[in-house]
Amino acid sequence: MGQDISESEQAGKQHTEVSHPESLSVWGLAWPSILNNLLFASVGLVAIKAVGNLGAGPVAAVGTGQRIFWVFQALLMAVMAGTTALVARAVGSGNNLEASQVTRASIGICLLISVVTVFFLWLSANEVIGIFGLDTATKELAVTYLQILISFTPLFSISMVISTALRAAGDVKTPLYIGVVTNVLNIYLLLGLVNGEYGLPKLGIVGAALAGGISFSAGSLIYLYLWYSKHLVISIGKKGSMTSTRMKQLFEVGYPAGMESFVFQFGMLAFFWIVALYGTSAVAAYNIGVNVLMVSFTVGWGFAIAGSTLTGQYLGAKDPEGAYRSGYKAAGFTMLSMGFLGLILAIFSRELATFFINDEEVVNYAVIFVWMLAIMQPFMALEFALGGSVRGAGDTRSPLIITIVGLILVRVPIAFLFYYFGFSLAWIFSALIADYFIKGVLLILRFRSRRWMKVLNLDPKSDNN
């Protein structure tokens, strides 16, 4: 990683040029990310279908293991927020070397975090999974799934950083192409390893975990090859990327995002715990419902990426009006598309849930969940689009506060009160409505204030070492 920077920049320019905000558009940035996310969502659907053949217990085990896995990715998400904001600003101001150095520093930080995470969860997976009160067999499956999947985190973190940096620089197609390869591989391994098809051994839950881990690793190896061979718009940079100035900038943007991720995952775990109080069927229905609506969520993620990239680059280019307009465009696109998709998925929710599992109780619960969350898709869209836009500008504190209000102070307490007074599971799911409505309104107010534009003030003379 000690390549001379002049060689790296020259090689990078021979292959592709960094895009600047005036050459980008909301839809142009969003569609490759949406397509990539749809492929990723299809993996989740295949996983639920494959594991669903094993029964409600394995479905609940996979969902619980995945929930814990993403809780411990919160620190990585914090680094991703800093990477997005700093790379986009650097590219918007024409400082491509700084974008490379930020990427390099982010990889080092994420590798360290990942190793610590793997060590901790291997030692405590049984205790962590135990808080959900699953039956003994389901708990053992969840522990096994989590321990295998978490082992691949260090390699997974590399692909997260490089793909995030590329999108922040305006290159959304390279992550799409690599995503096609890794997701197709993941689907093949899921179908083969879970149920013993295509000449592969039947490994059940173990196969589901290995499928995800192997495909994550394959994607990271592809990114590393392209990065070292100078085929990416973000060059490999040079030694000494972890300067005090750069680390401080990553920390200032990243720590609120990290806190938000922890708050979000803690809130989701608390809500998930309340759902689990209604039994294994309720947990399985929750996981199926989330995967049914994943098609709609992927659209939101795509526009969130577009919004964060454009606001960051426009502000780096000293064009605050361009940043403001791009955020509203992203929000408009997202509300229309997620609202439409949510309605369609809700209408066919029973057929979709039945496709995944042949259990009437689970299907009935899943239909209720899908309808509840489908109603709030336009407000979820605001969280995706406007939240992504302000984060891209470096404002990670206001999303943290808004998440605390909506999730911790509204959704979880309401759901717990409903459970305490003996209300049905449908009432638990209805707490989602209040959460997303409040967060949507608060994000509109924050975005209209324009104060998020002034949060990140980078020193133009920042050290490039």
Image: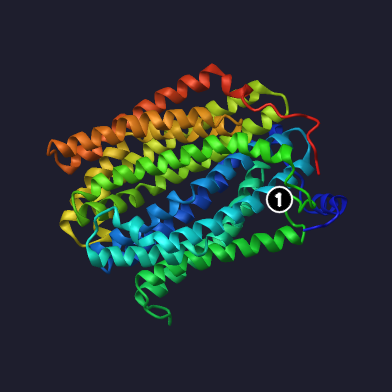
- Residue at mark 1: 104
User: Could you tell me the amino acid type at mark 1?
Assistant: Arg
Q: Is 159 displayed left or right of 68 in the figure?
A: right
Quadrant of residue 157 within the rendered picture: bottom right
Please identify the quadrant where the C terminus is shown: top right
> Is any atom of residue 176 visible in this view?
no
Quadrant of residue 49 within the rendered picture: bottom left
The residue positioned 32% from the left and 67% from the top of the image is 141
Residue 356: where, in percent of width, then height?
A: 28, 60
Residue 235: where, in percent of width, then height?
A: 76, 51
The residue positioned 42% from the left and 38% from the top of the image is 263
> Is any atom of residue 173 visible in this view?
yes
Quadrant of residue 313 within the rendered picture: top right
Please identify the quadrant where the N terminus is shown: bottom right
The residue positioned 47% from the left and 36% from the top of the image is 384
Residue 422: where, in percent of width, then height?
A: 12, 39
Q: Give the structural element (helix, strand or loop) at label 1.
A: helix
